[in-house]
Amino acid sequence: MSEWLESAIARAQGINDWLAPKRANALDLLANSQWPTRKTEAWRYTPLRPVERTQAKVLTDEVNLKPIAIADLSAIELVFVNGKFDPSQLADMLPDGVSIALGRDLDSTKQTDALNAFSTIKPQRHLFGLVNDALAQDVVIVTVAEGVDIAQPIRISSLLSLGAESHTRVQVSLGAGARLTVIEDVQAQGDSLNTAFVEYNVAAKAHLEHYRFALQTGTNVAIGGSHFNLHDHAKMHSSIVAFGSDLSRLDTDIIHAGEYADAKLNAMYLLDNKELFDLHATVEHAMANGTTQENVRGIVADRARAVFNGRIHIHRDAQKTSAELNNRNLLMSDKAEINTKPELEIYADDVKCAHGATVAEIDKQALYYLETRGISRSKAQVMLNFGFINELIDLMPNAALAEWVRPIIRERFAQMDVE
Amino acid sequence: MTEQIDKALAREYEAGFVSNVESETFMPGLDEDVIRRISAMKNEPEWMLEWRLSAFREWLEMDEPDWALVDYPKIDFQSISYYSAPKSMKDKPKSLDEVDPELLRTYEKLGIPLIEQQMLAGVAVDAVFDSVSVVTTFREKLEEAGVIFCSISEALHKYPDLVRKYIGSVVPKKDNYYAALNCAVFTDGSFVYIPKGTRCPMELSTYFRINEQNTGQFERTLIVADEGSHVSYLEGCTAPQRDENQLHAAVVELVALDNAEIKYSTVQNWYPGDENGKGGIYNFVTKRGICHTNAKISWTQVETGSSVTWKYPSCILKGDNSVGEFYSVALTRGRQQADTGTKMIHLGKNTKSTIISKGISAGRSNNSYRGLVRMNPGAQGARNYTQCDSLLIGDQCGAHTFPYVESRNPSAIVEHEATTSKVSDEQLFLCRQRGLDPEKAVSMIVNGFCKEVFKELPMEFAVEAGKLLEISLEGSVG
């Protein structure tokens, strides 16, 4: 076990609040965990040295940080500053049917419900998820009542100042037939460490639109997870856009807990310099007639490294499942590295499952075509790269977010060091 | 394969050290003494003993791998006898009447002649028959071409320099747990050397190799194809072997020097255990080949036997323009578990690899493809294409795919595709409409599913492999 984890456990032991039984459970599991090494399958390509060496500390001074503004996006802002929930940034009036509150402030019935639901969707195998269970102090509970359609997105921002350590946790629950959009974002100023986990319970016929942006680069360690539980006829559509940092790791788990659920996940990662990004996406088809479609695309330049693990697990009872996963990668430099592993684990026979993975460089013919039209090689490369990723941006249902992220991505490509 | 043939031929060179083997079976247990005795028994050179001992010391420090998707009780390595002489006549069934009728029915369907059936079932046969002459002519023809094909024990005496140069050069002693164990205790196996520029005049097969019997448990095969040579090697036989041995930890090493080509085909049909998963072989095999410049290694395997399979025939594409191929059909039924696939390590420029894997799961079995394609920084212009298809028959089985893709060269192209489905109702309906019964229909569809792999097998193997699948699928349909 590492010093970092030992100190995390020691700090967590001092917390005594409404989540005590869950925290104790997490600490038990942590005490029996091995610190991941190269031989740990889930961390095979992602060394934890940046965690071991981090100087990030929990900061208690008041700081005033605000999430970046996104044009044409009017969101309900749920802001954590250095791990602390900042209620002053939350709108005074929430739309009918939505409640956002700290777990510790809930009345006892609601608190018991929240306690029972806590950490039931996020699988216990995530080591840093357990750390988050034990250390996240301000746990925010978001609920949307049955049948309510919330047009205004909720944006969950974890903001970190230089050298800060934070552990943030949100539990989102959609009532039957409800509709909601949630945006998750982490913005850190360097030398930081954060774990940011969100669990989503999507009741029957509810519809969740989800975005996760991991755009902080540089000397930040960001480890997080988005975990979804889908009931009968529930739908989810998730878009993930990630840049890398010293260590950036995201775990998503989509659980088809009901029949006829439908999940779509579009993820893209664009890495430069010495960045690392690791996406572990797991889909559990526990019930029949579910559909899953995953599209994951990556561009890796300079000395960056990308890791993708896409697991689809079809349980014995999940007959008539249809699941597809596609992972396409472009390597831009001979020092860059891609490690991808699409996995299928199938225990039901009447299913249609497929996955594909490719790693290649940019299409030489397309490049040549553009050059013959008088476009410089470097410009042509940016165009092609952008087109490759833009196909997934086009699929984002929220136009304001797509318009916001497009120029950011274009800028990133323009800066990428390509040969 | 055939004990009598073996005996007849073994006489020429077995004198000196085999005689005392006849009655010798070591007490279960494994320590340095056992290894010394194995080595002494085989009259091995000193360096070989040292090599075995150092492998054993490495092995003691290693952990049994647990990453494969297979589940079996822990093996007690101290309860295994590491040297056993050929089964003595009195332990064998006296006649085919004493052999499991299920086994005999299978032989019959495969069209195996009676005399061979007796051999396969291990019946004590006293008659000497025609095949002896076949073997003799076969030997002569090879010698004419300069091809060396003998047991590895024999090679250690006759060609020690060749063996010393290449043994362990592809699969190092401490490569993995079972390989290390094999290095320490291997009892016998095949050695093949094809001289420069030679095309081996016939397909080599363990079927013909003498002194082959009862070496199965810790077998070691080494094939060296010198520059510009070509060889096709067939391993195994298509009929189930009535062997109660539990653990098979074999090592196969292939060396294809510049411009050489090795084609290695396996049909594996070890005892898979009964319906409830009782008994059967643990097939934990390390197979790997190294390709030098412009060389090619092609692995083709049809796996239908063994209760647990852990096997990843691999290619190290070291030389520029070298080619690696892996064609596999793995069928599991009953309670069988197979975790099999390949590794293609691209080191040289313009190296190419193709992986075609077809998994069929029936009954309560689990069938996994596990593969690795690695493009190293030097693999300029390298290319890989992988296709893994799984077919499920019945709702109690599992089909899994775990492909690892690691690329560190932007000009290398890796493509991986995998699909999983069941035998489609439409196809079945079409076949049944044409008057085929469900079992025939499924077997036809499965045969079509595996066609890409079967066409890579040598002719006679392909026919038998098709039949073998048909038999293995019996009772799995409906």
Image (cartoon, rainbow, N blue to C red):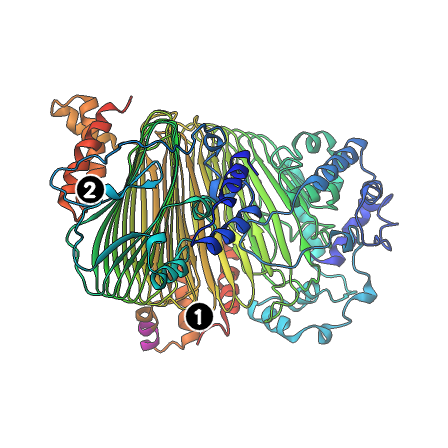
| Badge 1: chain ID | B
Looking at the rendered structure, the secondary structure element under dot 1 is loop
Q: Provide the residue designation for mark 1.
A: B394
Q: Would you say A222 lies left or right of A147 here?
A: right
Q: Would you say A113 lies left or right of B300 here?
A: left
Could you tell me if residue B330 is visible in this image? no
The residue positioned 52% from the left and 38% from the top of the image is A5
The residue positioned 73% from the left and 61% from the top of the image is B129
Looking at the rendered structure, the secondary structure element under dot 2 is helix
Q: Give the image quarter of residue A235.
A: bottom left
Residue B449 % position (x, y): 40, 60
**Magenta stretch encompasses residue A189:** no
Q: Give the image quarter of residue A208.
A: bottom left
Cα gap from disc 2 to disc 1, whole angstroms: 40 Å
Amino acid type at circle 1 is: Gly
The residue positioned 60% from the left and 61% from the top of the image is B307
Q: Which residues are magenta?
A: B429-434
Amino acid type at circle 2 is: Ile
Nearer-the-camera pick, B248 or B55: B55
Q: Would you say B193 lies left or right of B368 here?
A: right
| Badge 2: chain ID | A
Q: Give the image quarter of residue A106.
A: bottom left
Q: Provide the residue designation for mark 2.
A: A393
Residue A360 % position (x, y): 32, 35
Nearer-the-camera pick, A20 or B78: A20
Image quarter hosting the N terminus of chain B: bottom right
Nearer-the-camera pick, B317 or A230: A230
Report the predominant secondary structure element of the magenta stretch. helix
**Magenta stretch encompasses residue B432:** yes
Image quarter hosting the C terminus of chain B: bottom left
